[in-house]
Amino acid sequence: MYAINLLKLLFRQEDHLFKLHRAEKLFNFWKLLFLLFVVSILTYIWTSWIGLGTDPISVNATEFTHTEYEMRKLWFLIGRVAYAILFTAFILFVSSLFWWLFNDVRYRKLIIIQMNVLLVMLLERITWIPLMVYAGIDWYVSPFSFGVAAAYITDIEWIIYFFGAISLFQIWIIWYQVKSLKYLSSTKKHWIWLGVISWHILLWAGTAALANYDLLLLYILNG
């Protein structure tokens, strides 16, 4: 029996990966799952409330009446809540499904590993807040990412976004996933590394594509 403790699994990995590996029953799973969805939603509500990501709305604010502007802000907030739910579900369930297909580990245990991955990703998004608010720095040129270096080399936005998605947080996540999968599964080490890095390259490419086209889609939807 293993009572899930995400912080201990994060900071005392060897001991708790051993317990997780041996466990036949898992406690607090559904409670933590619900809590992480709530934390993710609150994080995105917070960033929306202070105006992060509202540029497409703010740019044309003078063209709207006060009521129209407030309604657009409300719909933007609803959209961010929906995005938070989809983002959390993807990280917890879809990523875990990908690991489950190629490793002999129980699906629920992989979700537990992804819970800590989600926590680190939310922490990364929280670090964007002071950078954007006080320094005017977007996420893709964060000092924690490789987007700054890419911006000096090229003006191609997709490449800048791609390398901007690669951060110190993401590198730590890769290391954590590899270590956890090595401990929980019998898959050979080089296949684990190949699978994890390949998956993250796909995620970074998808993030870059979304960042490259989201403003265009918003402008189209706004008419």
Image (cartoon, rainbow, N blue to C red):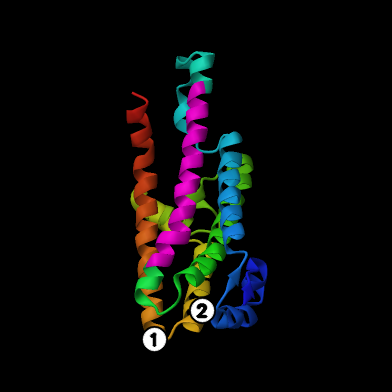
Q: How crowded is the residue under tag 1: few (<14 C-alpha within 10 Å), some, or many (20+)?
A: few
Magenta highlight: main SS: helix
Residue 207 in the image: state x and y as whole percent: 39, 52
Residue 24 image offset from top left, x and y in percent: 55, 78
Point 46% across, 36% down: residue:
79
Answer with left or right where residue 72 lies relative to residue 130.
left
In this view of the protein, can residue 54 be seen by the observer? no
Element marked by disc 1: loop
- Residue 161 is labelled as none
Query: Which residue is at the front of the view, 100 or 214?
Result: 100
Q: Earlier in the sequence, mark 2 or mark 1?
A: 2
Q: Count the marks.
A: 2
Residues 110 and 3: in front is 3
Task: Say which residue label 1 marks.
Answer: 188
Residue 74 visible? The answer is yes
Q: Quadrant of the C terminus?
A: top left
Q: Which amino acid type is shown beneath numbered disc 1?
A: Lys
For marks 2 and 1, give the CA distance.
12 Å
Question: Does the magenta-highlighted stretch encompass residue 79?
Answer: yes
As drawn, 205 above or below 63: below
As drawn, the label of residue 179 is 2
* Residue in the image at 38% along x and 59% along y: 203
Q: Range of the magenta residues?
A: 71-97
Which quadrant: the N terminus? bottom right
Seen at 34% across and 35% down, the residue is 217
Residue furthest top in the image: 65
Q: Position of residue 10 (x, y in %)?
A: 62, 70
**Label 2 residue SS:** helix
Please indicate whether residue 155 sits to the left or right of residue 3 in the image. Answer: left
Residue 136 sits in quarter: top right
Q: Amino acid under label 2? A: Lys
